[in-house]
Amino acid sequence: MTLPPVAFVGLGAIGAPMAAHLAEGGRLTVWNRTRVVAERFAARHQAMVAATPRDAAAAGELVLTCLPTSREVEAVLDGPDGLLAGFRRGALLIDCTSGDPASSRRIAARLAERGVGFVDAPVSGGTNGAEAGTLAVMVGGEAGAFDRARPVLERFGRRIEHVGPVGAGHALKSVNNALLAVNILAAGEGLAALVKAGVPAATALEVVNASSGRSFVTETLIPERVLTGAWPVTFRLALLAKDVGIARGVLRERGVEGPLLDQAGELLDRARATLGEAADYLEPIRLIERQAGVEIRG
Ligand code: NDP
């Protein structure tokens, strides 16, 4: 099926491979803050480059954003060159940022005044999943808006779920990533102690992965990235720390105490301050290794 005209804003680590699938599906216009990134993408995937977010919105019936946080999404909406200045009535904004629910509700209300629809549609599955077109997409919004977004989301997603009203996708995504963060920290701490106790890291992981403590972190991330010493940068620690912060906000908003997530959030914020904005999300394990005086290698 050919897609209606689509625009994509934010060609970062995950946005670019997502947008590449849309280029295969029909007419695609892209905008990126650093223009050369958009130009390189357009040359490779036969897309058009918009000079401003406003031009991108004017070119697309469906407009996707994939930016670090909801703050940047709100920033590209405003101003004479912002998305709001370019949207046609009846357009739909599909926000694939891992954003925060309160901002999404605010954005949806502003767009509704201009006859523009909104869904929050954050993704999970990493850059590999984006390249393979196998992402999970969790969508918040009205049923009609979800139906319109679905054919676009199917281009890069395998599991596409309508999970509730506007903001529900972002809430679910933040809780998912909070679970990921807890698993990373707990696995790092436990493995450091086991290696010091004389258990080889690879053996420890094999046994955990045949037992009840296994997770995506122990089955895939640590074997592929930590044991090998590869430490690729695919998802910035700063973004995971942001997600845990959003999850803590969701708990607070709903009156749920979250001492475990509070602790995980504080540990990630501290790791981010030590390791910097470019560090990968698994690198807190390096800090655990450093403190323990041990390396977790296979
Ligand atoms: P990156 O940091 O790789 O890319 C961020 C993108 O946002 C770039 O295109 C950047 O443009 C743009 N940007 C940053 N600040 C601004 C701004 N002020 N105004 C306009 N554009 C801006 O992030 P990712 O692609 O990794 O992540 C994007 C979203 O997807 C995040 O919410 C993240 O949590 C989520 N996500 C990421 C995953 C991953 O594996 N990487 C997995 C699942 C979700 P420029 O080129 O100019 O820097």
Image (cartoon, grey):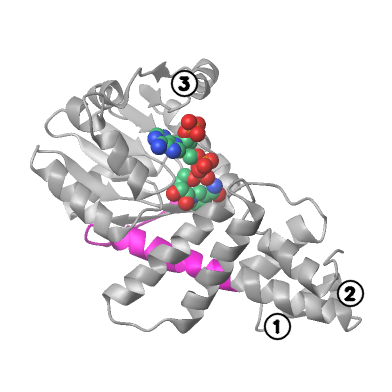
- On whether ligand 1 comes within 8 Å of the CB at mark 2, the answer is no
Q: Earlier in the sequence, mark 1 or mark 2?
A: 2
Q: Which mark is drawn over residue 289?
A: none
Q: Secondary structure at mark 1?
A: loop
Which mark, residue 35?
3
Q: Residue 121, image x and y in percent?
A: 34, 50
Disc 1 under 8 Å from ligand 1? The reply is no
Location of mark 1 (residue)? 211
Residue 118 colored in magenta in the image: no
Does residue 287 appear anywhere in the picture? yes
The residue labelled by disc 2 is: 200
Q: Is residue 79 left or right of residue 230?
A: left
Q: Is residue 223 above or below residue 43?
A: below
> Residue 160 lies in magenta, yes or no?
yes
The numbered mark, 2 or 3, whose residue comes first in the sequence reads: 3
The mark total stands at 3
In front here: 213 or 248? 248
| Residue 20 visible here | no
Q: Assign a secondary structure to mark 3.
A: helix
User: What residue is shown at x 37% (from left), y 24% (from top)?
Assistant: 28
The mark that comes first in sequence, 3 or 1, is 3
* Mark 2 → mark 3, Cα distance in angstroms: 47 Å
Magenta residues, start to end: 157-182
Rendered image quadrant of residue 165: bottom left
Residue 125 in the figure: left or right of residue 245: right
